[in-house]
Amino acid sequence: MKRFYNFSAGPSMLPESVLRKAADEMLCYEASGQSVMEMSHRSKPFEAIIAGAEALVRQNMAIPDNYHVLFLQGGASLQFHMLPLNFMTLNKKADFTLTGTWAQKALEEAQKLGSVNVVGSSKDKKWSYLPEITGADPEADYFHICYNNTIEGTQYHSIPDVGNVPLIGDISSGVLSKQLDVSRFAVLYAGAQKNLGPSGVTLVIIRKDMMERIPGGLPAMLNYKTHADNQSMYNTPPCYPIYMFKLVQEWIRDMGGPEELYRQNEQKARLLYDFLDSSSLFFSPVEKSVRSLMNVPFLTTETDPEKADALNKKFVKESDAAGLVNLAGHRSVGGMRASIYNAMPLEGVEALVAFMKNFEAQNS
């Protein structure tokens, strides 16, 4: 059966070579005589898998030695609460930029545990830009940003300067799309189901000095110390997603690392944005300087709401039939969205642009 080009925002497309290797090893991983799905997380084979996953992501992301690397569960959504629970503990306040749905959800969880200051918001223009950051409250326990806004299609192309305030970044949909200076952050976290593997595991990177802020008495599973002290195996970890994570890290290394992926991602994004900017039917609602490399929302120029909705539905139906799937925009913003993560080949974006040109010719 022919594989489609999957433009889903997550769970997203995985590299075909990774899927083939996983398929080859499904019944028997190396010489273990068992599938990774079956093996004990305390076994020697799995200990090697999780250690290899950590070593590879440290290499690919150039993570310094003074950072913990954790493999947790609960997605980024659980991190929204764990972060303030563990780290908003000195002055009970934090700074946030409000740049979209996921930034809003992170902010709402922090508000349950302390005082939150919105340093900048782009809500006034439907999240189409990133607000200027002119500094942080020196008494803030941390400053939180959403590095790449999956739904709204904006991305920080340079890391904000927040002085000595610890910077925390949700990098779920931008991780390893380009090289990121980990040392600029106190904490980074990412759900795997965009660029790192299947859903089920969450990567969390914590500068070790931040651990001193964690108060006593926290529930064990919500305490980062628990997971750091037990090498992410305090309880049964998501074994198979970690194995898949490792395979993706091997693929990234073999591709040439984030520098080569960035070159490819820039080429894919430029192809799609150039078409959108020249189209008479489609357009990008995002300010050019902050457009995401990974998530490209787009709308039609139809101004009548009912006609626009009908045109959107027609586009999604016909693109599905053409093997270009999951192009419907997020339910909160409508329109369409193409997520072109690391695993999306250039040929997929070329096929999408060709389809859009034909659709435009038939519907203008």
Image (spheres, rainbow, N blue to C red):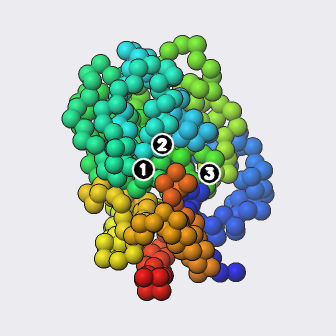
- What distance separates the C-alpha of mark 3 from that of mark 1? 18 Å
Q: Are marks 3 and 1 in contact (CB under 8 Å)?
A: no
Above or below residue 268? Residue 238 is above
Name the front one of labels 2 and 3. 2
| Residue at x 75% of width, y 56% of height | 35
Work out whether residue 102 or residue 128 is closer to the camera in this orientation and state it. 128
- Secondary structure of the residue carrying tag 1 is strand
- Quadrant, the C terminus: bottom left
Q: Residues within 10 Å of mark 2 (few under 14, many from 20)?
A: many
* Residue 51 found in image quarter: top right
Q: Residues within 10 Å of mark 3 (few under 14, many from 20)?
A: many
Q: Position of residue 284 (x, y in %)?
A: 36, 64
Q: Which residue is mark 3?
A: 199
Above or below residue 281? Residue 250 is above
Q: Amino acid at mark 1?
A: Asn
- Secondary structure of the residue carrying tag 2 is helix
| Residue at x 56% of width, y 38% of height | 77
Q: Which residue is mark 1?
A: 149
Q: Position of residue 83 (x, y in %)?
A: 48, 29
Q: Amino acid at mark 2?
A: Trp
| Residue at x 66% of width, y 40% of height | 237
| Residue at x 58% of width, y 66% of height | 326
